[in-house]
Amino acid sequence: MSLRTEQATCQGPAGLIEYTVDHPEDEPSGWALVLHPHPLHGGTRDNKIVTTVSRACVQHGLLAIRPNFRGVGASQGTFDRAVGETADMAAVVEHVFQAWPQAAAGPWVLAGFSFGSAVAAQLHADLADRGLPLPARLMLIGCAVERFRHRPLSMPPDTLMIHGEHDEVVPLAEGMDFARSHQLPMTVVPDAGHFFHGKLLILRQIVKSGLCGL
């Protein structure tokens, strides 16, 4: 299946935010926001974990949005340790509800990988504080939330956590500590490292299973 994609921008607190839109074959039944890893370590919207998650969402009939964080590609601003990035993604959510009303009328999914997981978790809390529409599913992959947390968090009980058994960047024990502190189950992929080399098909299947019922 080949994705139909387009590039777009919206306004954020630090300037323009560049994003890619991946379209499903038919009219979207909802949408997904998929957030990439650390911008200072090569993370972009085209990261293979991000595109794998996006593809799973598109196959489920969702419109998938993959933004570049500030300072990456054409996105303006400089790295802000998830504080500014969280504010930027809140602006993206509000933009999607205006620019893609049909997709926004359905359920939406918020997913983040590594640094993106920290932004996703804090974005969820920010949206809840502001009374804005919350995602039907939150996905944290290679969870690095505590490394960049700047606010209290309350995670939904159906949060999907996915971690590699041999994660060399965010050790499994660190992910387990976060899961334990929020009483969340975690799916561990045997023999997988941080970037799920050789395990992307398994990752995609776990994500697709997590989308069931939406």
Image (tube, grey):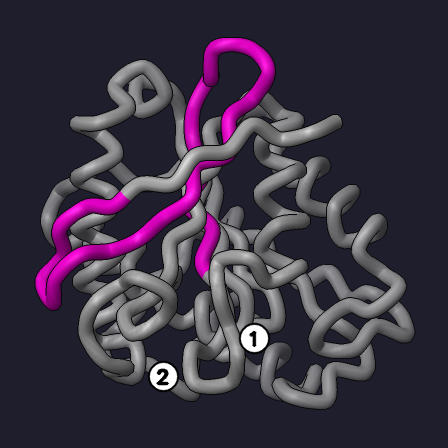
Above or below residue 59? Residue 185 is below
Residue 198, percent from left and from top: 89, 64
**Is 14 colored magenta in this rendering?**
yes
Would residue 31 appear left or right of 60 to someone viewing this image? left
Describe residue 82's horizontal placement relative to residue 20 as left or right: left
Label at residue 29 = none
49 vs 158, left or right, is right
Q: Which residues are magenta?
A: 9-35
Which quadrant of the structure image shows residue 197? bottom right
Q: Disc 1 or disc 2, which is closer to the eye?
A: 2
Q: Secondary structure at mark 1?
A: helix
The amino acid marked with disc number 2 is Phe
User: How much space separates mark 1 and mark 2, taking CA atoms?
Assistant: 18 Å
Q: Is residue 55 above or below residue 122?
A: above
Residue occupied by mark 1 = 180
Residue 26 seen from this side: yes
Quadrant of res 83: bottom left
Q: Residue furthest top?
A: 26
**Residue 32 part of the magenta-drawn span:** yes
Q: How many marks?
A: 2
Q: Quarter of the image for the N terminus: give it.
A: top right
Q: Characterize the local packing of mark 2: few (<14), some (14-19) or many (20 or more) Cα atoms within 10 angstroms.
A: some
Residue type pointed to by label 1:
Arg
The answer to whether residue 185 is seen in the rendering is no
Asked whether disc 1 touches disc 2, contact meaning CB atoms under 8 Å apart, the reply is no
**According to the image, label 2 marks what residue?**
148
